[in-house]
Image (cartoon, rainbow, N blue to C red):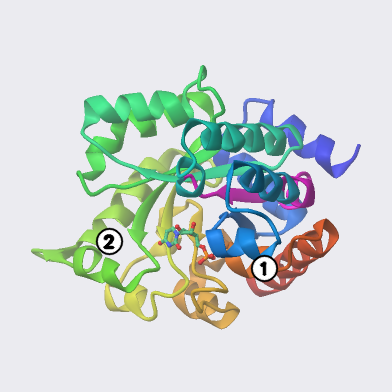
Amino acid sequence: MSTTDSTTDLAMTGLTFGQRLRATTDLHGPLCAGIDPHRTLVESWGLGYDLDGLRRFTDTCVEAFAGQVGVVKPQSAFFEVFGSRGVAVLEEAITALREAGTLVILDAKRGDIGSTMAAYAEAYLGKDAVAPGDAVTVSPYLGFESLRPALDLAAQTGRGVFVLALTSNPEGRSVQHARLRDTSVAESMVTSAASMNAAAAARGELGSVGLVVGATVGTAVQELQLDLAAVNGPLLSPGVGAQGGTSDDLRRVFGDALHNVLPASSREVLSAGPDVTALRDRALETSATLADLLR
Ligand SMILES: O=c1ccn([C@@H]2O[C@H](COP(=O)(O)O)[C@@H](O)[C@H]2O)c(=O)[nH]1
């Protein structure tokens, strides 16, 4: 059985997102490779910044990553820029990656009142969704409980959600470090995610409710006394590479939760294109380096 076959099978066996994620990162390494077709990147690949350029850029990424990299994170914004035809390119990429056994986290950062969140949940996590990923990023700033429709539907369909906790941008501090009585906003995300993952923890499995904690957050985890290991869920960590985050930063930020970290890198990996082999090699080398770190 090829590696592609084995991960494809996992996606069809009724396993939870946490179980599938653990299996795929054990097989392929922890890197979550981003697909972020920035104008400057697309142009640096010698492509026009138009629908055709978007399609060729995305197809190259799919060819390089599908079945080779365990997890891929397309950034929805860069496809939405091109309207419905850009979104169609995104949907085709998600389908192709998943057919090759690569897990897809759609970075869409959705969040709204519960009744609207239910529609977002159907769109990204439902069994009839047009091109659902394996997981989606969500924003909890309308209150963690506003995410309930997404949390419930993800659990039903074996998918995952990643809740923003400590984002990689410096502006995030003003909201995420804020305290209400003795608890910071970020800590309340940690507590809520841990409680969602409690049943999986009792079974000795990785949960399917993850958090986003940037590689660039410095000493925030220690300052806010966050127990990230207690989350027992995947910790998606953007900011590696172009935003300055390094392997040493990951070690410092995550400490005893390092084994659950999914480091995400987009521009740093994508800058190796447009050659498919060079792009794939950059991703595989990055993943191997990170695997050594997280071991
Ligand atoms: O806290 C966050 C949450 C999400 N992102 C997203 O990750 C990538 C990072 O791209 P790089 O090129 O590796 O900087 C991008 O899609 C962001 O929207 C994040 O950076 N920080």
Q: Give the CA separation, mark 2 to mark 1.
A: 32 Å
Q: Quadrant of the C terminus?
A: bottom right
**Is residue 73 one of those drawn in magenta?**
yes
Give how far across and how far down residue 31 sits, in percent: 65, 60
SS of the residue at dot 1? Answer: loop
Give the numbered dot on residue 180. Answer: none
Which mark is in front, 2 or 1? Answer: 1
Q: Residue at x 65, y 59 (%)?
A: 30
Q: Quadrant of the N terminus?
A: top right
Q: Quadrant of residue 130?
A: top right
Q: Which residue is drawn at 36% across and 81% down?
A: 219
Q: Which residue lies furthest to the right in this view?
A: 1
**Is residue 114 one of those drawn in magenta?**
no
Residue 144 drawn above or below residue 91? below
Give how far across and how far down residue 96 sits, in percent: 71, 34
* Residue bearing the label numbered 1: 271
The residue type indicated by label 1 comes to Ser
Give the numbered dot on residue 186. Answer: 2
Residue 132 drawn above or below residue 249? above
Q: Can residue 133 be seen in this view?
A: no
Q: Can residue 144 be seen in this view?
A: yes
Segment colored magenta: 62-76
Q: Which of 113 and 291 is in front in this view?
A: 113
Give how far across and how far down residue 216 sits, in percent: 43, 75
Give how far across and how far down residue 281 sits, in percent: 81, 64
The residue type indicated by label 2 comes to Ala
